[in-house]
Amino acid sequence: MARTRLVAGVLAALSAAAAAEHQRTVKFFLTGVLDFLLQRIDLPGVPDIALYLLTGLAAEGYPADSITDVVALNVAMQQRDDSSWSVGGVSRAPIEESNIARTVMGIRTLRIYGAPALRRSFEPRTTDDHAMLVRGLKLTGMDAAVPAAAAKLLALQRADGGWAGNPNLESNAFAAGETLVAVQELGSPRSNDEAWKRGVEYLPKTQRPDGSWHMKTRAPKFHPYFESGFPCGHDQWISAAATAWAATAIARRWGR
């Protein structure tokens, strides 16, 4: 029995030493390429090397740090539009053959080492975030999550019946219109829903005599000013978008 415990202790010590050496080697390698990874100058065989390195560190219980933050961000930026990860070229069977395997590793990697700041960026912060989240959940069939998301969106309604882009702004047609359209797409508004009634009453009150809705721009300017033909001068582009949302909400209201 004593000999068994001795052997187990030696093996544990050897395992810990091997893990520590492995972590030192990986950290030394990654430290030299972090600046490149941030610039999307990816490692060869993308994204496999990054995925296997982080998978190995995770198996050893290595905690997240500034190194894994950068590598995880690089992995996240390599995700394709269809949500998968792929080498995009000739696969090397069998350990670098399956995009399903890469995608599983990618998801697991981001769950373990995804930077907290990156995770927070996916939380809705603006009214646009909340409205699009409601629409996205509905369109992708995630109906169970819709009521809670819709309730958070409706809770942002202001005393005047409208919605603002964020807590620091006043109500505007863009936020109110897209909120009402999102709620309409759920198929739930009824004539006796107080929030719904106040919302559809808010929009006509803020409409201009020419039929448009004026909204002040707050986007940085990066090209010379020119006229599009839409009213509101320097605010014409965001006002056109706000008018589209408001008109859609009102048209759908009377079309119900």
Image (cartoon, rainbow, N blue to C red):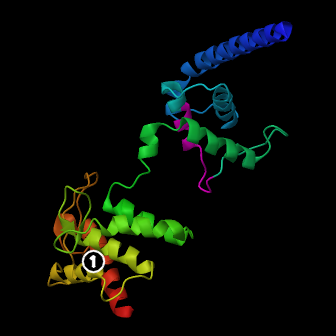
Position of residue 95 in the picture relative to residue 248 (left or right): right
Decide: few, some or many residues near mark 1? Use Cα within 10 Å; few <14, some 14-19, many ≥20.
Answer: some
Task: Using the image, determine if residue 236 lies above or below residue 124.
Answer: below
Q: Position of residue 8 (x, y in %)?
A: 79, 13
User: Could you tell me which residue is drawn at 45 percent across and 38 percent down?
Assistant: 116
From the viewer's side, name the closer residue of 76 and 143.
143
Residue 75 seen in this snapshot: no
Residue 242 seen in this snapshot: yes
* Quadrant location of the N terminus in the rendered image: top right
Residue placed farthest to the front in the image? 1
Q: Is residue 75 magenta?
A: yes
Task: Using the image, determine if residue 212 lies above or below residue 153.
Answer: below
Q: Position of residue 81 (x, y in %)?
A: 59, 55
From the viewer's side, name the closer residue of 189 and 27.
189
**Helix, strand or loop at disc 1?**
helix
Q: Position of residue 183 (x, y in %)?
A: 38, 76
Look at mark 1 in the image and give the residue it sits on. 195
User: Could you tell me which residue is drawn at 35 percent across and 87 percent down?
Assistant: 190
* Quadrant location of the C terminus in the rendered image: bottom left
Name the kind of residue labelled 1 in the image.
Ala
Q: Which residues are magenta?
A: 71-83
